[in-house]
Image: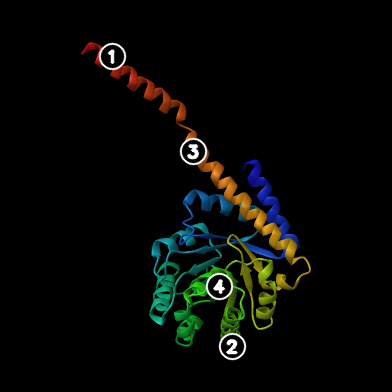
Amino acid sequence: MNQTERRMLDMLKRGRDQFGVVAVKAEFEAEGTRPDELLRLLELAWRADLGLALKIGGCEAVTDLHASRLYGADHIIAPMVETPYALSKFVDARAKVYGEADDSGAHFLFNLETQTALENLPAMLPLARKGLHGIVFGRVDFTLSRGMPRGAINERSITDAVLEVAKSCAASDLELVVGGSVALEALPALREIRSVRLDRFETRKVIFDGAAVESAQIEAGIANAVEFELAWLENKRDYYAAIADEDMPRIRMMRERSLAGKRRRLAAA
């Protein structure tokens, strides 16, 4: 581990011990996590004694499910599931990869992130109860799906939609996870949702236990999560910059050889 990664590990341990952090998160979908990045995050999670949540590329992303099983992901999330049919695809894919008698201990959830999915939720709940563990409410995409600007994420109508899903989860004994620009401004909404049901909430890379929203230290916890994510991006930038630069001396040498050869050929002509 390099110096930045050791600092990141300290942040995760502090998050675990003081702020209710329970897992870190990677995405094969929108974030496009590469295998080497996932391995770095997995080591950090293992060393910090935290879980790993992995958002796969779609409801029937079988290769991603094989990867989630190989890496030992604790939470597997399928994105953009809007209909009972799409949800059935995820349930079937999960059974195909993990087996009907799944003993992995992993929890499977689907992302509710559009108005269409909300309208179809009553028809999707029976399937979810039989084959999955819960729902992740993606507030950013949900807000955008309503034609509202991203900055409207904490408006009353969005919180009311999350509360509607929270009530359904409570009645169906399904976990509810809330994501989407979780920052200090989201805390009042999260506390209201928690009064109905909130098992976990997440920033882009860090997942908190739902009870953490009631802690007096939650503002410091979110600040710690933001600091971790910034360090993650800086470490990623430096890692790929080092790879990009590692062959520069040889590139320069080969260019010089090529130019020298051209000069010799011109001179001979």
Please identify the quadrant where the N terminus is shown: top right
Which residue has dot 4 on it? Answer: 139
Query: Label 3 near label 4: C-beta < 8 Å?
Result: no
Q: CA distance from mark 3 to mark 1?
A: 33 Å
- Along the horizontal axis of the image, is 2 left or right of 145? right
Whole-percent x, y for residue 48 in the image: 66, 55
Query: Which disc, if any, is residue 243?
Result: 3
Whole-angstrom CA distance, mark 1 to mark 4, is 64 Å
Q: Residue at x 51, y 67 (%)?
A: 76
At label 4, counting other C-alpha atoms closer than 10 Å, the crowd grade (few under 14, some 14-19, many 20 or more) is many
Which of the two labelled residues, at mark 1 and mark 4, occupies the earlier sequence position? 4
In the depicted structure, whether residue 206 falls above or below residue 246:
below
* Residue that mark 2 sits on: 171
Secondary structure beneath disc 3?
A: helix
Instruction: Measuring from the top left, give residue 62's x and y in whole percent.
Output: 39, 65
Q: What distance separates the C-alpha of mark 4 from that of mark 3?
A: 36 Å
